[in-house]
Image: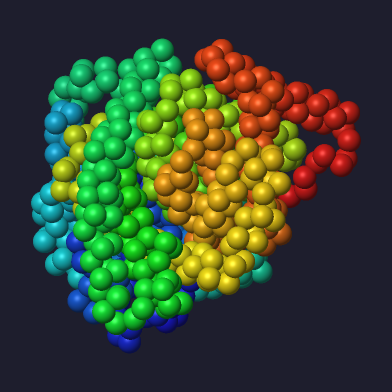
Amino acid sequence: MANCCHNSKETRIEMPPGARRIVLAGNPNVGKSVIFNYLTGMYVDVSNYPGTTLEISHGHYEGNLVIDTPGVYGISSFNDEERVARDVILSADVVVNVVNAMYLERDLFLTLQIIDTGVPTVVVLNMVDEAEQNGLKIDYEKLSQLLGVRIIPTVAIKKQNLDQLKSAIYEALPGHVDKKIAEKILTLSDQVKNKGEALLILEGDKNIAKKYNMQPGTEQEEIYLHRRQKVDSIINQIVQDTKQNSALSLFINRLMIRPCTGIPLFLLALYIMYKTIGVFVAGTVVGFTEETVMVGIYEPFARHLVSQIINLNSVLGTILAGEFGLLTMTVTYVLGLLMPLVVGFYFFLSLFEDSGYLPRIAALSDRALTGIGLNGRAIIPLILGFGCVTVATITTRLLGSEREKRIAVFLLGLTIPCSAQLGVIAGMLAKIAPQFIILYISVILTVLVATGTILHILLPGNTSDLLIDLPPLRLPSLKNVLTKTWTKSYQFLLEAFPLFALGALLISVLQLTGVLASLQNLLSPLTMNWLHLPKESANAFIMGIVRRDFGAAGLANMQLTSLQVIVALITITLFVPCIASILVIFKERSKKEALLMWLGTWVIAFTVGGIVAQLAHLIGTTTPWQILAIAAAVWTIALVLILVLKYFKKQASPFITIEN
């Protein structure tokens, strides 16, 4: 047995000497991560939507290695998740197969496939409380007899019966391999070293067949059909449906996914978020934490403390406690301004995730996203991007094709502000007239739609169909929501503080050396003439190179007119992603592609911001109609650009096709 395993990104996991490899496997959204947390004591994200686990997580339980795999419907080579899960499962000493009791008919297909590989298995039948509430009576003992493995009925989120799993892991059995399949596997026993790989070769897995220099089998359809019939037979023997599904749950579900009711509900949810985060948190809470606590109490204390050691006007004193000081501005921005906004946003995002609302938004938005080359599943990374673009970029792995991943990653980097930036934006918008807010939202949406449409036109290929499970609607667990909010907010602190400190140090050095004033003058044609902003706004864009929310925070403390607020926010929203996001984009995409995306955001941000400023100068901003006319003009420019590209595409001009 190998002493390590790897995922698609070749992350090696060291195997402790003498340890057993315990692998968690199951369909998406069945609760594997909860069980991983229980066994290892480590926290990985738990949500009520498919695709939470996109990377291999590993930890230890009683000296053994525990590996959490991405949710899959089968082990084969159809996509990255299945390839990763396949390799890890085939190398396991024990597979803990987590099954959703509500969807046994779906989940048992993977269970039978795992058992057919011959790996010792324990089945965790999770969410049995929801199955009972929906009138499903399951004969656990009969299921255990039919499969030949132990069945542990659990409610993992409440830790019910998870103690039984600990002992069952050491009693795992290979289970009853299907006789017909066992006979076929036997024919390959002298050519292939284990049953699992022989099974996958029979099912046509090209990668495994290539490993043995063999032709992939052609019996996949026959084996899958036989396995499906066996699942149906098992279901008929062990499940009794005693009542219809909850009428209320079905009613709410329909309201959420039908456009005529789902869109107003979605807009209502966004409005509540805006009033809570943009008005209450950004106004009342931040007013207290930033002005009263940080500026009024903390900063004088920090300056006094520094002055007891060094001269505040010295170089070190300026770096530590000056206008852009490491101990003054950095701490005030992170803790006083951004942290309350980040906590507020992650609280709402956790509610969306745990209630099961996110996948319903995916179903609702499918048709709209098809127009920009994506399907409804892409709404999950796009919404997660409002929390953290870095994490959302990794989440694009759940998309079905490289084409969709490419479009989603670029849109995330260009048009989606992270939670901290969004909080600052909401706070600044709350202070200006509604027509300016409409202008901002309209321009950002226009850029998102136009960019997506243009990439949809230029990139070869088509949008894949939406295939997504709609999990049951649940009342979120307050404990899980608060844990997730705290965990993500803490991760923000860990990531943001060093980068903010770096940005503050950079700005202070530029200020002390006189370079900052020179840069302001050098960039004045761009900031003053093109964007019609004060030349000091160059500071915010320099800070924004480190993190966009850092730059947005700099804008928040400037005296700007309503139009300048909009132009500045449009530019900083479309500005380059933060350093952490850029590093992930370089990791997820090719270097050439990532570099093009990074340069593209520079060009688009200043071009669009400048166009709005110039149109405002031309049309005027005295009346609401003039402001709406600016939005209409931006939309018209984007439409003309799209029509021109479509025309040339129709003419099959080779210079506008982007090769894969």
| Residue located at (15% from left, 28% from top) | 135
> Of residues 479 and 142, which is closer to you in this image?
479
| Residue located at (26% from left, 63% from top) | 300
Q: Is residue 137 above or below residue 251?
A: below
Residue 441 appears in the picture as rendered: no
Please provide percent x and percent y for residue 377. 48, 37
Please provide percent x and percent y for residue 35. 23, 57
| Residue located at (37% from left, 37% from top) | 427
Q: Is residue 409 left or right of residue 3?
A: right
Q: Is residue 397 left or right of residue 647?
A: left
Please provide percent x and percent y for residue 150. 19, 57
The image quadrant that residue 253 belongs to is top left
The image quadrant that residue 587 belongs to is bottom right
Please provide percent x and percent y for residue 267. 38, 23
> Of residues 362 and 103, which is closer to you in this image?
362
| Residue located at (60% from left, 60% from top) | 517
Q: In this figure, which colouring scheme has been used for the structure?
A: rainbow
Q: Quadrant of the N terminus?
A: bottom left
Q: Is residue 331 above or below residue 316?
A: above
Tally the numbered discs: 0
